[in-house]
Amino acid sequence: FSVGWLFAMLWSAARLSRGAITFGTLTAIVQLVSQVQTPVTSLSGYLPKYYTMLASADRILETEYLPESVAYNMPGLDVGKIYDEMSYMEMESVTFGYGRENVIEDGSVRINKGDFTVISGISGIGKSTFFKLLTGVLTPQKGSISVVSGGKKYHIDKYMRPLFAYVPQGNMLMSGTIRDNIKLTNSTATDDEVLEAAKISCAYDFINELPSGLDTVLMENGRGLSEGQIQRLAVARAVLSGAPVMLLDEATSALDAETEKKLLLGLRSLKGRTCVIISHKTAAFEVADSVIEIKDGHLHSKKI
């Protein structure tokens, strides 16, 4: 558009030097160029937004074509009662792989109700896949995953997911207040309940130091907070959800050893909860009841 200005000025200057136009006409030409350029410039800014919108729409439409989750149970399953009577969760002869390579092969393990279990193994071995199988997000090619409760077996499927509170590796904070972020899984919780969850996750102290406390407004992805503070808020959200089985996927990786151990002991203090954590750090093993190691596609379980 600088070329447009240059052409208008040169043409006007040439005409003005010959007396073909007046200074008033020159001013009018300059204003006309400005009026033409402004909407065209604005229009060009909409093109990137348009393509971004198309890409977003494609991602949304992809969800419409996702395969339906396998359902073994009927809707309206009383998950709370099942957990009250639960003895353990069990994987029996489970095989699962991506393409030709099996991540887990003929794996069988039990996770007892109320236990604190650590999932260990080298990076990329299939620990996050283990969680996806356990929650019914992925379906094994062979074998079964179930909850044994009241002498019955209930296959884990989409209707059993209220059993679980999952804290992923990634940052899942949204723009809004700290209160809103923690209450995302339990909108009816009181401030006292929110603060109690924050105490268990070791987030209470830093929240209390903020001028606005729970009313502190966070930016998208928690920008302005440290990674450790973000992780503690995510754990507080899981605690507040009330889900009886907590799954933590490297959710304490950014914490120092002292804070991590305090947080894990806080989770252990929750009555009736079962906790499964993916971790390589010593603090997790110090408070664990059992360890499930994934190695070469096989599951090895041992009591501590």
Image (cartoon, helix red, strand yellow):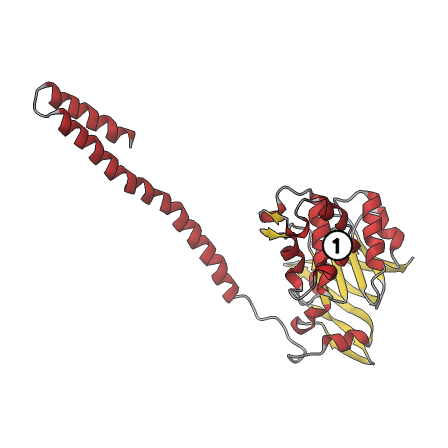
Residue for point 32% across, 40% down: 41
Tally of numbered tags:
1
Write down the quadrant of residue 152 in the picture: bottom right
Residue 48 showing in the rendered view: yes
Q: Is residue 209 left or right of residue 215?
A: right
Label 1 sits on what residue type?
A: Ala
Residue 175: x and y in percent read 58, 51
Q: Which image quarter holds the C terminus?
A: bottom right
Q: Is residue 22 above or below residue 268?
A: above
- Circle 1 crowding by C-alpha within 10 Å: few under 14, some 14–19, many from 20: many
Residue lying at the far top in this picture: please name it.
17
Q: Is residue 65 left or right of residue 73?
A: left
Residue for point 24% across, 26% down: 6
Q: Is residue 125 above or below residue 69?
A: above
Closer to us: 26 or 261:
26
Residue 66: x and y in percent read 54, 66
Q: Is residue 184 left or right of residue 240?
A: left
Q: Is residue 136 above or below residue 219?
A: below
On the image, numbered disc 1 is attached to which residue? 198
Residue 259: x and y in percent read 81, 46
Residue for point 29% across, 33% down: 1
Residue 127 showing in the rendered view: no
